[in-house]
Image (spheres, rainbow, N blue to C red):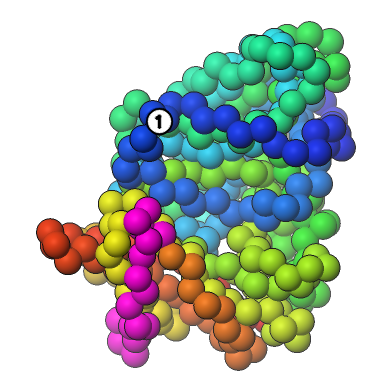
């Protein structure tokens, strides 16, 4: 069925957490690839079938190791009084195509889980959900996320669950920057087909057991100065005075330090260590000064303008002195335009 797009009906999100205790457990470090303030629609593929959508976040945004402990997602229900059961899972890439492996074997073992959401109140509502797995799942270095939406309980479009989305046509990338296809749907014949224009993103990410490093783009691309964590973060536009910085999160390292390793390339053979896998090429690399982490193990660095055509792979070492604890984050790449 032809993809349906609906303008946002809820001007603000109501915060709701699922699967979390009052004191948040450790090992749930958020990694998303989305511009939070620039959702353009809330979407699903159709109103008469179960929809299977995929968000194949680029390896440049997350190349890692270790375990995924859950998901972060923003969903909307046109009639929140009806309960909706969704499924989330990690999925492998289909070779080097950038597409998801839609077969049963493409799902990472132990990652598929149903979540019953909504079911109270009235009218349309959107919620930010934190959904955790019963047991963290060992994930491949690169993976995507599969989202299965149920057939609407009531008459569509008066009822039905959708996911928040930024259309690729709304991105503020430089004219010379290509827009890869990151969002897909599973067609009736089982194949992966593009969902939305190239460059589109879902407001859907993962919670990682190990620490995370994420680039941000400090920019006025959308009219006012802000930190962008979506596609613009990977392709800062120097002519627009975009600036690049890092966000660190390691909830087991409160009060510790983050030490960022930067390199011009990713190693052909990543280095395995007792503290995690190191992905950037070590030859010619350098460490930035240590960054103090707050009590939650988080830090945001100042931003700076990169020279045009500069490519940087980065990864952070998270350090706790007493008691001694060291772990590497995932890795990410930025390419200044």
Residue underneath mark 1 = 22
Which residue occupies 37% across, 83% down?
A: 288
Residue 226 vs 121, above or below: the answer is below
Would residue 215 be found to the left or right of residue 298 on screen?
Answer: right
Task: Residue 230: name its quadrant.
Answer: bottom right
Q: Is residue 287 magenta?
A: yes
Would residue 258 be found to the left or right of residue 44 on screen?
Answer: left
Residue 143 in view (yes/no): no
User: In terms of depth relative to the viewer, which is nearer, 275 or 179?
Assistant: 275
Q: Where's the N terminus, which quadrant?
A: top right
Which residue occupies 75% across, 86% down?
A: 239
Q: Position of residue 136 (x, y in %)?
A: 32, 36
Label count reads 1
User: In terms of depth relative to the viewer, which is nearer, 102 or 91?
Assistant: 91
Which residue occupies 64% across, 44% down?
A: 203
Residue 316 in view (yes/no): yes
Q: Is residue 288 magenta?
A: yes
Q: Main secondary structure of the magenta part?
A: loop
Would residue 323 be found to the left or right of residue 303 on screen?
Answer: left
Residue 51 vs 163, above or below: the answer is above
Task: Residue 133: name its quadrant.
Answer: top left
Magenta span: 282-298
Q: Where's the C terminus, which quadrant?
A: bottom right
Q: Residue furthest left?
A: 323
């Amino acid at each position: 069925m032809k993809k349906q797009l609906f303008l946002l009906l809820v001007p603000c999100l109501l915060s709701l957490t699922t699967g979390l205790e009052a004191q948040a457990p450790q090992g749930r470090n958020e990694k998303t690839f989305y511009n939070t303030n620039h959702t353009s629609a809330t979407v699903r593929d159709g109103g008469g079938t179960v929809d299977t959508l995929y968000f194949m976040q680029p390896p440049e945004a997350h190349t890692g190791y270790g375990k995924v402990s859950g998901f972060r997602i923003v969903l909307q229900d046109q009639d929140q009084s009806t309960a909706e059961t969704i499924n989330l899972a990690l999925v492998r890439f289909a070779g080097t195509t950038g597409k998801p492996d839609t077969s049963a074997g493409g799902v990472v073992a132990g990652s598929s889980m149903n979540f019953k959401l909504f079911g109270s109140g009235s009218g349309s509502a959107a919620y930010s959900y934190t959904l955790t797995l019963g047991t963290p799942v060992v994930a491949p270095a690169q993976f995507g996320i599969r989202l299965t939406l149920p057939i609407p309980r009531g008459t569509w479009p008066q009822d039905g669950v959708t996911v928040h989305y930024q259309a690729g046509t709304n991105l503020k990338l430089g004219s010379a920057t290509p827009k890869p296809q990151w969002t897909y749907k599973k067609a009736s014949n089982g194949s992966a087909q593009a969902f939305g224009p190239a460059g589109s993103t879902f407001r859907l990410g993962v919670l990682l057991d190990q620490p995370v490093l994420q680039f941000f783009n400090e920019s006025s691309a959308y009219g006012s100065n802000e930190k962008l964590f979506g596609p613009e973060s990977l392709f800062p536009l120097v002519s627009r005075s975009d600036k690049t910085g890092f966000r660190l999160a390691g909830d087991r390292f409160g009060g510790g330090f983050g030490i960022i390793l930067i390199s011009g390339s990713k190693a052909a053979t990543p280095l395995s260590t007792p503290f995690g896998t190191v992905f950037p090429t070590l030859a010619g690399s350098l460490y930035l000064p240590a960054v103090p982490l707050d009590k939650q193990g988080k830090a945001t660095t100042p931003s700076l303008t990169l020279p045009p055509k500069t490519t940087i792979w980065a990864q952070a070492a998270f350090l706790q002195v007493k008691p001694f604890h060291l772990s590497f984050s995932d890795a990410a790449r930025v390419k200044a335009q």
